[in-house]
């Protein structure tokens, strides 16, 4: 039996010490350790897929993203 260990991953924007709002549940998901280490969750395709799932869960997702104090806004649609 193979055991999987899951880790928290900041999907849309990586964690920054001076931006605690990026630790919001709208930006965090669990991934297995193997996938996390592979870098796959950081691909644009994976991030867009995560964003679409979060849109279903959080009606205010776009407003939350727009309100982030970041100089460069990324698009996931």
Image (tube, grey):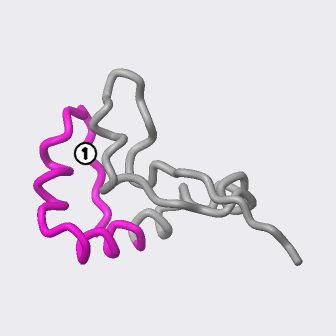
Residue that appears at 33% across and 53% down: 25
Q: In which quarter of the image is residue 59?
A: bottom left
Going by the image, does 23 lie left or right of 43? left
Residue that appears at 71% across and 57% down: 33
Indicate whether 38 appears above or below 59.
above
Quadrant (top left/top right/bottom left/bottom right) for the N terminus: bottom right
Spot occupied by residue 72 in the image (x, y as percentages of width and height): 27, 38
Q: Which of 2 and 66 is in front in this view?
A: 2
Magenta stretch encompasses residue 21: no
Going by the image, does 67 lie left or right of 23? left
Spot occupied by residue 64 in the image (x, y as percentages of width and height): 16, 51
Magenta stretch encompasses residue 67: yes
Q: Give the range drawn in magenta.
A: 49-77
Spot occupied by residue 26 in the image (x, y as percentages of width and height): 30, 56
Residue that label 1 marks: 73
Q: How many labels does the image show?
A: 1
């Amino acid at each position: 039996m193979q055991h999987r260990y899951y880790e928290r991953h900041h999907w849309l924007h990586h964690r920054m010490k001076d931006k605690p709002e990026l630790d919001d549940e709208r930006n965090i998901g669990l991934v297995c350790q193997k996938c996390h280490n592979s870098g796959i969750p950081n691909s644009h395709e994976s991030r867009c897929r995560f964003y679409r799932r979060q849109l279903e869960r959080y009606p205010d997702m776009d407003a939350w993203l727009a309100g982030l104090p970041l100089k460069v806004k990324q698009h996931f649609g």
